[in-house]
Image: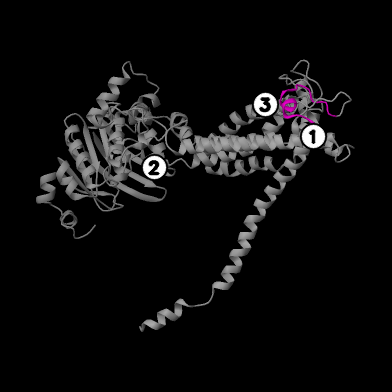
Amino acid sequence: MRAENIHAWFGPTHALKGVTMSIVDRQVTAIIGPSGCGKSTFVRCLNRMHEVVPGARVEGKVLLDGQNIYGTRINPVRVRRHVGMVFQKPNPFPTMTIRENVLAGLRLNGQSSSDPEHVVETALKQAALWEEVKDTLGKSGSSLSGGQQQRLCIARALALEPDVLLMDEPCSALDPIATARIEELVHELSSKYTIVIVTHNMQQAARVADFTAFFYQGEIVEYGETDVIFTRPQNQRTEDYITGRFG
Amino acid sequence: MPSQNVALSLHAPRARSERVIARVLQACGWLSVLTTAGIVAVLLFEALGFFREVSVIDFLTDTEWTPLFADKHFGIWPLLSGTLLTTIIAIAVALPLGLLAAIYLSEFARPRVAGVLKPVLEMLAGVPTVVYGYFALTLVTPALQRFVPGLSGFNALSPGIVMGIMILPIIASLSEDAITAVPASLREGAYALGGTKLGAVFRVVLPSASSGIIAAVILGVSRAIGETMIVAIAAGQQPRLTADPRVPLETMTAYIVQVSLGDTPTGTLEYRTIFAVGLSLFVMTLLLNAVSHRMRARILKGGAL
């Protein structure tokens, strides 16, 4: 996946000012930066979720398997099938059971699976939630703990077998133990999926990501292998940020 | 600072005016409770007088209601069926239209369009019901007579439809509030899974708003059951146990109007019938409220209906 010269606006606010970056397949890419730097906006441009907000606008290209997802004949709804997303706050559908939550993507796409039980089990196993919920699949999704809810949301996204999984600060509403489980999961999932994770927690980026991009004021300041970014940053602002001098 | 200064400021004597205001507010609260209690007491007292002469069993099992005739029957069913039939027609009109209007206003209308449409829709609620009644009798009934064979001048269909229009704003407006209150994060979750706008609305947003929508419908039903002028004007005054919406019938409320405005002397059995009917109406709305409470509680506990 590759973003080329992405500009994004919220009404008159120019939130992203020409971001170009290639995201490596089957690796974890972290996006770090201070609040308001445009990191969440950027990932929301990668599955055309930015334009869902009234008054929001995007320019530029995002290539997925060589196809520009902002091309004229592209249906944003189809794009989101291929580029899944997990949000800051776990948002399981409260009126659905755990099982229905996992199948929600298929239902929303008007598809019926020949073997829904298999889809549910596979997705929940991939999200490391199966053992905890396999006997209570008929319970409401909101009956789970925060960390479990977030893993349910991950399972829900994985059930569609996306190419890319975007995670927008997936642990910011979770306690440290639940956070550790999600980080472990991100690591496991990277063998099969391309993952982009937004975080304001630099230790988290250092722990889970193969590549890290540092965003500041709507621009990409530095992007490279995580080790390099954290040990030998090339840019003074990156160094100031990761050493905690600002942000 | 010396500690006694703090103690002094704690003694500031402003408690009296606050106590007076609290009392006034308390009195206002109790006033509504007392009014309700007074209404219930009158209803019960007069209805008891009625049931001393007519057995409850006759009231609930007789299928004729002819208290003003020489051959008196006191079966509530003809009036009850009249009320139920007009209410069912009203809900059949108002629920789909109101819900679709709410979906359009909250999900599809541009803010400017919604800003005009919603107040206009709510204006429907301000139309006096007597106007609706004449609208039903003089416009809707003649219009319907062209399509519906055998439709009488007085019938259940026309006032039912017009009552549906009357409660449409209640259902649309309250449903819209419920739909708008569904957190944006749930919509985004649906979009992020490749859901279309319609898919998100019908699979995620509406189920999440169901408690509010049910409350809206129940409020609409209560209004329809209690509605008086439209049915008194356009449905006729012939108590009849029927499910045929084309023939004249009489609802509970219309009967109360008929007797109240007629020359039935106070204190007679005929006069007391209206309290028995009123009590029945009261019990129905009470039951509806209880049902809506239980449904809401069940939904709030988590899970769908």
Between residue A42 and residue B34, name the one nearer to us.
Answer: B34
* Amino acid under disc 1: Thr
Residue assigned mark 3? B89
Which contiguous range is marked in magenta? B52-67
Residue extending furthest toward the front: B52
Three-letter code for the amino acid on which mark 2 is drawn: Arg
Residue on which disc 1 sits: B273
Measuring from the top left, give residue A60's x and y in whole percent.
Answer: 31, 39
The Cα–Cα distance between marks 1 and 2, rounded to whole angstroms, is 67 Å
Secondary structure, mark 2, is: strand
User: Which residue does the image show at 22% across and 49% down from the upper left?
Assistant: A201
Front: mark 3 or 2: 3
Q: With respect to residue B128, does B58 lie above or below?
A: above
Provide the residue designation for mark 2: A57
Locate residue B56 relative to residue A125 in the image: left or right: right
Magenta span contains residue B59:
yes
Q: Quadrant of residue A124?
A: top left
Q: Residue at x 43, y 44 (%)?
A: A55
Quarter in which the N terminus of chain A is drawn: top left
Q: Residues within 10 Å of mark 2 (few under 14, many from 20)?
A: some
Residue situated in front as seen by the camera: B19 or B183: B19
A74 left or right of A171?
A: right
Specify the amino acid type for callout 3.
Answer: Ile
- In the rendered image, residue A154, in percent from the top left (x then y), is placed at 28, 34
Q: Are marks 3 and 2 in contact (CB under 8 Å)?
A: no
Secondary structure under tag 3 reads helix
Q: Assign a secondary structure to mark 1.
A: helix
Residue B123 at x, y = what percent?
Answer: 67, 43
